[in-house]
Image: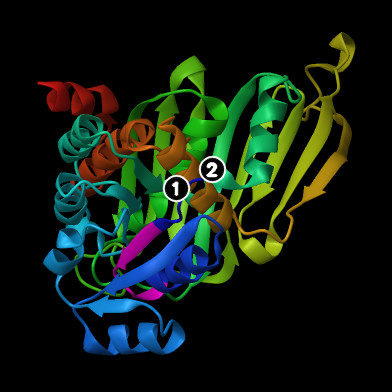
Amino acid sequence: MKHDIRVAVVGAGYWGAHLLRVFQATEGFALTHVCDMRPEALHDAQVRYPHVVVESALSAVLRDPTIDAVVVATPPAAHVTIAEAALNAGKHVWVEKPLALTYTEGQRLVALAHAQRRALFVDETFLYDPLVEQLRVWLAAGAIGKPQHVTLERTGMGRIRRDSNVWWNSAPHDVSILHYVLNARVRAIAVFGYAFVQPGIADVVWASLQMEERLMAHIHLHWLFPEKKAPLTIVGERGMLRYEGRFEQRRLTRYGYRLGEVAPEIRRAANVIPIEQYQVEEEVYGDPVEPLTRASLAFREMIHSGDPAPSSGEQSLRTLAVLEAGAQSLAQGGMWIEVSAIVDRGRG
């Protein structure tokens, strides 16, 4: 009989609090430890979960042989250091996105997890939404014909971070979804951004991505925006798919459309192409189970079986390459950056 996986959560901030709740409630896990340098965060965690052991030092968690897995929910700059130490201590590791801040660092973590025979899981939460899986199925079945262009947005009012910009904080979700549903690589990326709220920390970006199969994608991320939304729209040859990822709004819609023909005798005079048909053909709403819970179940399965999850460290490397290329472009004022250059440098 399999014993519960004993989990320590490192970082009890905004997202760490969600992870504490999920790992406490998910069958097959036993939440045993919380680690944070801030006394107030540890106090809040122990009030909510009186049975857990609270620690201010990561070393105490890593030395404990009863802990099976470490969940890293710290600012991005600390991900690699903590994940590497946990893997070296023989722990399975869950890392909040992004896996790392460079492709080379991510590769190092993946190689270490393989050498240690431990699971390395990246919290790309939306890959575990059944609506995203349905979107992937529809695309594979040719429901809208060949995809032509993709638009992703992630906006809201608040949660303005001081430890990372909006690109590193929000783009991992959109790039990972893009890879997962289309199974096409990003060739090059150009990212423009502005820092309106804090000097040097972009709070709004627009990214253009050139992908395989002549596919274009565009991403808009904004921390100071009146509407909270996270839509993905894919326009194909004969239909469109739209996924809304915000939990309280989750739904997937499939549209059909048909363009009309302009008769040869009036082609010179006509200045529009008629749309003969446009309608909602199918709509699916999200169920009450949050994707984060399903992500924890995928982590559990990865630990038990050894089989990679959709957001395993190795799978997440291609997202990390795009993120690093995008960060370089952002720093260079929107210059086009080849993603392959990031990958080749990492291999070299």
> Furthest-front residue in view?
1
Residue type pointed to by label 2: Leu
- SS for tag 1? loop
Dots 1 and 2: beta carbons under 8 Å? yes
- Relative horizontal placement of residue 176, taking residue 133 as reference (left or right): left
The image shows residue 133 at horizontal and vertical percentages of 64, 37
Please give the residue where the numbered disc 2 appears in the rendered image.
127
- SS for tag 2? helix
Front position in the image: 12 or 325: 12
Q: Which residues are magenta?
A: 6-14
- Residue at 69 percent across and 62 percent down: it is 249
- Relative horizontal placement of residue 20, taking residue 33 as reference (left or right): right
User: Does any portion of residue 316 appear in the rendered image?
Assistant: yes
Front position in the image: 215 or 184: 184
User: Does any portion of residue 204 appear in the rendered image?
Assistant: no
- Which label number is shown at residue 53? none
Please give the residue where the numbered disc 1 appears in the rendered image.
124
The image shows residue 333 at horizontal and vertical percentages of 23, 47
> Furthest-top residue in view?
264
Q: Is residue 6 above or below residue 324?
A: below
The image shows residue 143 at horizontal and vertical percentages of 76, 24
Q: Is residue 12 above or below residue 235?
A: below
- Residue at 40 percent across and 80 percent down: it is 51
**Magenta region includes residue 202:** no
